[in-house]
Amino acid sequence: MQIRFCVAALLAVALVTTPTPGVDDETTRALATLKRVTREGKGNEDAGPAWKTLVSKGGGALLPTLEAFEDGNHTAANWLRTAVDAIAEAEKAAGRKLPADKLEAFTLNPKFAADARRKAYELLLTQDSTAKARLLPGFINDKSADLRRDAISNELEILERTAPPTLKADLEKLFAATRDKDQVELLAKKVIAAGGKASISEHFGFVTFASLIGPFDAPESKGFAIAYAPDTAKDSSGKFTGKEAAELKWIPASTSDPLGKFDLNKLLGKHKNSVAFALTTIVSQQEQPCEIRVTSPTSLKIFLNQKELFGRDEYHHGSPFDGNVGRGTLRKGENVIVVKVCQNNQTENWAQDWRFQMRVCDDTGGPLAGITQVSAIDGKAVPLGLISEKPTNTEDKK
């Protein structure tokens, strides 16, 4: 990989350079070149020389490089991160301190990319031993997932060490703030142990009621690219022709899984070379941006109000939590979300999963104000994440 080459082969160049004050044209061009690198490899040929130029500028390029990070451009961020590390190492080797005041100001400024702020914070800690205790408490509700996680872990450590009389309330506060699945599960256990209540499903805002339809035929595992009528469904009405000319109609379903899992093998039957759809209606009291996050091991598409927000044609390569994110805007009133979940024809045991989890949240993974889901069972508006003690769906009949 070129990134590894730059880190290993060009670091020596960085360690003997001297800083150039200000942001000159060469620095600007080098940063622009690195920001153009894409996941597909576009721009890699120019990235190595640009990285070398950037690092040769020394400490004067540190803050401009941090400012160049952009949320969502992970490939470019990797190049920029290694450049920041090389610059910092060069400054240390030359006996020069990093600008702690500027790093702190950068860390505290939410306009900058989350990864860059976390990197600035790490560099700040090497210059100021008091920064952790001073800054971390302020990051409990930060938009940076890493800074938020660090802050919550730090507060939890303090609570467990001091066991204050307000422990239950303090744990509930941390539980409300946390976003990472493992930390959510840990804090839920601690809240309950302290005598409080904690619903993981409601915390994450899982869709727990949906209408399902399928299976539709997907010859040669090409269902992702085929347009089916439910792609643009406005409601759960109508009848359709599925695999082997079977007549299909939407069926109401709910899940009692604490992580909102709908197992399509159980709900619709085990099928290969197939496509199924899940439809849910979300009611919002106001127009607001949202993220629709779906966890699934198979190819899928996410639609909001008949508009495709996201698609990924990938089968059985793992199913990281929140691995598929559609970004859109909820309109005031009813909103229809459709998730198209595909299945291919692989026969290995590990390739038989056909399932999904879906949640609706803000861009930090937290709850949105004033939204409910419409129960596919009785049409009532209920909170997101509400779990039925006995789900009403085809799984009960299997």
Image: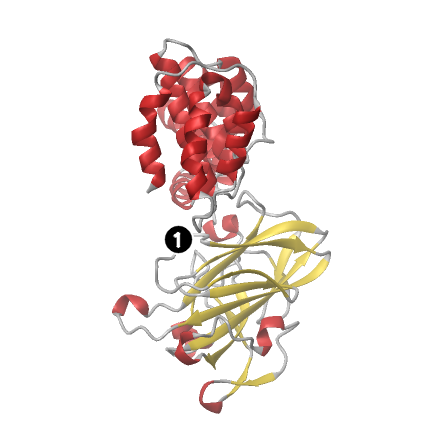
Name the residue located 43 percent from the left edge and 22 percent from the top edge. 56
Q: Disc 1 residue type? A: Pro
Q: Position of residue 159 (x, y in %)?
A: 41, 27
Q: Give the labeled residue for mark 1.
A: 320
Res 102 visible: yes
Of residues 350 and 168, the one nearer the viewer is 350
Horizontal arrangement in the rendering, residue 113 relative to residue 336 (left or right): left
Of residues 394 and 119, the one nearer the viewer is 119
Name the residue located 39 percent from the left edge and 62 percent from the top edge. 297
Q: Position of residue 262 (x, y in %)?
A: 44, 66
Say what secondary structure mark 1 lies in: loop
Name the residue located 71 percent from the left edge and 56 percent from the top edge. 331
Q: Residues within 10 Å of mark 1 (few under 14, many from 20)?
A: few
Q: Position of residue 207 (x, y in %)?
A: 53, 60
Outermost residue, left direction?
A: 349
Name the residue located 30 percent from the left edge and 30 percent from the top edge. 9
Of residues 288 and 186, the one nearer the viewer is 288
Height in image: 347 above or below 96? below
